[in-house]
Amino acid sequence: MAEGHAALAAGRPGAAAAAFRRACYLDAGSPLARLGLALALDSAGDAEARRAFAVARAALERPGLDESALDGLRASDLVRLVEHRLERLG
């Protein structure tokens, strides 16, 4: 996922999306990989961003989610971010 974050920070959302897609493939249940993909698609203006945010939200709201896998972030804060982005996308 570091590759995806680096590409997104460098303004290369297409490369970021590809990296996050690989991360999702390797760990389909990773909420952070799903969120990274959604953010990259949104940055690229891709119409799939809306669906990707919905999938990320579902992963973040999964019962029994181990928040220690969220790199110190709270699931509730990430869900609010996703909801904000979904509202913005309309």
Image (cartoon, helix red, strand yellow):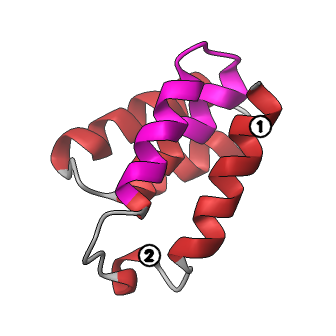
Kindly state the secondary structure of the residue where label 2 is placed.
helix
Determine whether label 1 and label 2 are within 8 Å by CB: no
Look at the image and tell me whether residue 2 can be seen.
Answer: yes
Q: Dot 1: few (<14), some (14–19), or many (≥20) neighbours within 10 Å?
A: few
The residue lying toward the viewer, choosing from 30 and 17, is 30
Residue 6 in picture, x, y percent from top left: 59, 50
Please state the extent of the stretch shown in magenta in the rendering. 38-59
The CA span between labels 1 and 2 is 23 Å
Query: Residue 31 is drawn in which quadrant?
Result: bottom left
Does label 1 or label 2 sit earlier along the sequence? 2
Q: Is residue 1 visible?
A: no
Taking the image as shown, residue 57 lies to the left or right of residue 12, namely: left
Q: Quadrant of the C terminus?
A: top right
Q: Which mark is residue 32?
A: none
Q: Is residue 28 above or below residue 16?
A: below
> Residue under circle 2?
70
Amino acid type indicated by mark 1: Glu
Magenta-colored stretch includes residue 58: yes
